Image: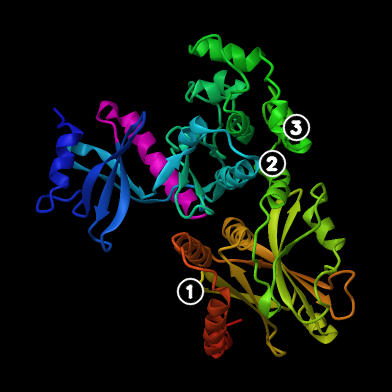
Amino acid sequence: MFKPLSDLVKSFGNESGNLLANRYQLVHQIGRGAMGQVYKAIDKSSGNIIVAIKFLSQALLDEKMRSRFETEAKISALLGEHSNHIVKVKDYGIGNDQVPFYVMEYMEGEDLDQLVKKKSLSIARFLYLTRQICLGLECAHNGILINGQLAPIIHRDIKPSNIFLAKNTDKNTIVKILDFGIAQVHDPSQGTTQQHFMGTPEYCSPEQMAEEELAPTSDIYSLGVLMYQMLSQKKPIMAENRTFQSWYKAHQELTPQPLPSYLQLPQNLDSLIMKCLAKSPLDRPQNIGEILRVITPLEREYNKPNGEDNSFGYSAVRTPQNRESLSLQQLYLTSNWPSDKPRKKIVFPCLTDSQEGEFSSLWTMLESEEVNIFQPKTTLCFNHFMFQLNPHPMILWVNLLYNRNYEPKWLPCYLDLKTETGNQISNNLVNKGLYYILLFELGKPTQYKQLLTVKISLDKTKQLQEFIDKSLSFRGENQSELSKITLKKQFESVKNTILSAINKSKI
């Protein structure tokens, strides 16, 4: 006979009593779902950091549910390493009376369901939140490694209550996707056919209701329902009653209601949402990248960042809009040096929306002799990231072009984490794990001369993610110049150390 979880909490919450896994002191319950309860807790082994702990419901303590619960923890832990928009899982264990639990980052805020019930969202707010939801979903759909192969993750339960809006500052709500409890792992060695229906009928795709094979397009249908609801506080399809049979018929047969005209949505946004709600998976956007190519430019239009700092000759731009139908290679080949940038030796980061998705790049002008030296086949590129939280959260992104027969070339630029552009590029570097360097010749701005592909190691993407996470708690005034000066001094002090380490290695 199991003790009630509330009795266990009392003992674990006693300062002088036992700790869960000899580490966690439970405080009180903060949430409840279909699979279990969530408690606020103190991690006594990590400087009394506040965490959240989810316990599997004692009513579900069979081997099948234990396995699913453990899978949920593993999926969240792996995905959370690569996206700031998926809840981070830090630990997994078995508590008293064999009750499984996992430990998550603790977040203050509310879920999207609570927000949407209070009011419909402005277009600007909608775009800001939806882009973050898409980034989290894109990470899941990109998959995790299983037996050396990427296995896409289909969430299967995208709905408002599984989207958490973590409090940071009024201007910087961070979206986190929760609850991968019924997520489907597309193991390349197996199929993706559902054994039986699982999900929330109001948000499920027609193929999910029919227990057919699923692809990421199933989540995209659910996202369509979610986006419709965020803007209108209504669902695009309503069943006769709340039974499975009624919702099955509704998703299979009923035409979604048009979005209300009073919303005055941009036509491409209206069309995108309705396309996500297509009955056939083939008629929907085929990946999250297609959605981001509409959402991201609109967000830039409706949420223009203020006070972006372009001093020290470093700045951030995006490639011209309305070119997302081109491949990344085509975009780079047809891109000229921006007319608003001086034609001199500067470095600036750029985000490019292409057929393949959104990618980061560094653009720089060099002397013709230098451009000819640093060719892809003979050049190694080393990246290094430095961070300053106070008085302003700022990343110094350093690249070193290295050809052992010539003088090395340093390419430093800043990413201001209090601007939307700085955040977008930083998160893109984490999610993609690679970027490109375009080398232009001085006096020849019409096309780049060399294109270098640079990968970021897993350790450095984790480091970048830590920088992003630390910046979320910052609430000070804009003092970006001071942080830049500090970072520049630190950079000068480590230059020789970096070069020495490179020269000693076997290149």
**In the image, is residue 293 above or below residue 4?**
below
Q: Can residue 37 be seen in this view?
A: yes
Q: Mark 2: which amino acid?
A: Ile
For marks 3 and 2, give the one nearer the viewer: 3
How many labels were placed on the picture? 3
Q: Do the residues labelled 3 and 1 touch (CB within 8 Å)?
A: no
| Residue 497 in picture, x, y percent from top left | 52, 88
Q: Marks 3 and 2: CB-CB under 8 Å?
A: no
Residue identified by numbered label 1: 391
Q: Name the kind of residue labelled 3 in the image.
A: Ser
Q: Which of 304 and 35 lies nearest the eye of the viewer?
A: 304
The magenta segment is 56-83
Disc 2 vs disc 1: Cβ atoms closer than 8 Å?
no
Residue 165: x and y, percent? 48, 44
CA neighbours of label 2 inside 10 A, class few (<14), some (14 to 19), many (20+): many
Query: Which amino acid is tagged 1?
Result: Pro
> Mark 3 highlights which residue?
271
Which quarter of the image is occupied by the N terminus?
A: top left
Residue identifier under label 2 = 291
Residue at disc 3, secondary structure: helix
The residue depicted at 48 percent of the width and 63 percent of the height is: 471
Spatial CA distance of label 2 from label 1 is 36 Å
